[in-house]
């Protein structure tokens, strides 16, 4: 059976399950079927792209894009519309984002900044400031009639860096011990923190009825920095005691339950004080493991990140498939939309290449550092997803065309980085 026929059959089943409910079937039946199709499809997509040396997130995203743009050919696309708009599936995808950011927080080693010093800080700051300015300028030029918040949010989506994708490529190349690699990883982690603060400012400002003001920005920055600072400080003193207590209790699954509870509680507290939930999940990971050593439990000394793997394998790919389902490729039939996407891609690449100017010291390959900061990956998709969910003047901040252009930018930058790093380290 061909892959094309299989995909058509999947969309047909989704359409049938959404449009016709059998006698005696529960209202959850279409959701369960849709969940099964999306999870399996995400895994298959990830496995396929991994065979070509690409991160699995690309396959998950492409599977969603493929389903979304194939669906009009089958049963009027009713099944995909049901999946795309279903609140339960969307909530499960949001759980995946929280788990992903919690995992990133666990992986963040605060001591890495001390090892790479000033270079990482300068690279990270440039990696946020320059792409933001370029993205804002392009959006203001191409979308002059849109509210100012739209221009700001487009700029914010270009600030992200996927530390996970870059770290994976550097590890595959066996160059993680090189000074350039350490600078890239340290800067990418700090870039994530700065990007989350930018996201907090932009998302918080979007909910202000009076618009963006200096006082609003200062207040949101203070909350974000204070929240992350408190998490780091408390984690330094309390995390070892908490982990030690869990280890002495010998409770089966207690470490995993504690970690998930902290993740959700951090997300709840962040939303309560007006920040994005993902900031709280990230802060919970940093709190529990501020030095990235991998908190362990049980006789086999399994780490919390290893315990999280089954949950991540289910919920995180679901989020990226749902993000792909929001992309309408027909929007690129408009020359202006295609041009907008091309300019965003150019701005995203050039903006991160400027990071090389932040490298301090002789003998370091600044071009390698710039390339390592290019991929937006899952972080860029999270930014885009939040932009599509927020509204201003009754309309989503990111329109369909703008959202699709940003996703294309994420795809291209994520594809470019592994190729560029392999080329430059092989050449050196």
Image (cartoon, rainbow, N blue to C red):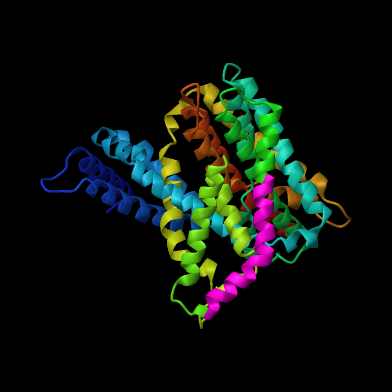
Q: Nearer the viewer, residue 373 or 204?
A: 204
Q: Position of residue 37 (x, y in %)?
A: 31, 51
Query: Residue 155 sits in which quadrant?
Result: top right
**Image position, residue 68 (x, y; %):** 37, 38
> Can the viewer see residue 51 in this picture?
no
In this view of the protein, can residue 82 be seen by the observer?
yes
Q: Quadrant of residue 276?
A: top right
Q: Is residue 200 left or right of residue 229?
A: left
Q: Quadrant of the C terminus?
A: bottom right
233 magenta-colored: yes
The span picked out in magenta is 225-248
User: Most extreme residue toward the top, as rendered?
Assistant: 145
Residue 250 position (above or below residue 186): below
Could you say where residue 201 lies in the image, as x and y percent from the top left? 63, 36
Considering only vertical position in the picture, is 394 above or below 181? above
Q: Compared to 279, does 407 lie above or below?
A: above
């Amino acid at each position: 059976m061909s892959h094309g026929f299989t995909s058509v059959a999947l969309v047909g089943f989704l359409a049938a399950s959404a449009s016709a409910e059998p006698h005696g079937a529960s209202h959850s039946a279409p959701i369960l079927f849709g969940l099964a199709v999306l999870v399996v499809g995400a895994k298959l997509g990830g496995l396929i792209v991994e065979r070509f040396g690409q991160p699995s997130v690309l396959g998950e995203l492409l599977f969603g894009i493929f389903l979304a743009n194939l669906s009009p050919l089958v049963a009027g696309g009713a099944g995909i519309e049901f999946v795309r708009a279903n609140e339960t599936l969307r909530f499960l995808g949001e759980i995946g984002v929280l788990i992903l950011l919690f995992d990133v927080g666990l992986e963040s080693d605060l001591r890495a900044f001390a090892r790479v010093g000033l270079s990482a800080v300068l690279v990270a700051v440039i990696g946020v400031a320059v792409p933001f300015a370029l993205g804002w300028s392009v959006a203001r030029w191409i979308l002059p009639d849109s509210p100012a918040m739209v221009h700001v949010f487009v700029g914010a989506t270009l600030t992200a860096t996927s530390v996970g994708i870059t770290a994976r490529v550097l590890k595959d190349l066996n160059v993680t011990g090189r000074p350039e690699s350490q600078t890239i990883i340290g800067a990418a982690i700090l870039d994530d923190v700065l990007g989350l603060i930018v996201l907090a400012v932009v998302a918080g400002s979007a909910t202000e009825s009076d618009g963006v003001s200096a006082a609003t920005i200062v207040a949101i920055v203070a909350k974000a920095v204070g929240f992350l600072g408190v998490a780091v400080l408390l984690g330094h003193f309390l995390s070892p005691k908490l982990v030690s207590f869990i280890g002495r209790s010998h409770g089966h699954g207690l470490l995993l339950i504690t970690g998930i509870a902290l993740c959700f509680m951090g997300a709840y507290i962040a939303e309560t004080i007006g920040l994005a939930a993902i900031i709280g999940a990230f802060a919970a990971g940093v709190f529990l493991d501020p030095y990235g050593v991998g908190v362990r439990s049980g006789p086999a000394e399994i780490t919390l990140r290893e315990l999280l793997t089954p949950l991540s394998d289910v919920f995180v790919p679901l989020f990226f498939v749902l993000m792909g389902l929001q992309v309408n490729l027909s929007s690129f039939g408009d020359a202006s939309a295609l041009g907008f996407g091309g300019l965003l891609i150019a701005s995203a690449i050039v903006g991160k290449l400027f990071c090389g100017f932040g490298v301090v010291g002789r003998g370091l390959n600044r071009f390698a550092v710039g390339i390592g900061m290019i991929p937006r990956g899952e972080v860029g998709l999270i930014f885009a997803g939040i932009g599509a969910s927020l509204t201003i003047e009754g309309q989503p901040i990111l329109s369909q065309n703008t959202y699709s252009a940003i996703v294309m930018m994420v795809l291209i930058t994520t594809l470019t980085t592994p190729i560029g790093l392999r080329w430059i380290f092989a050449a050196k």
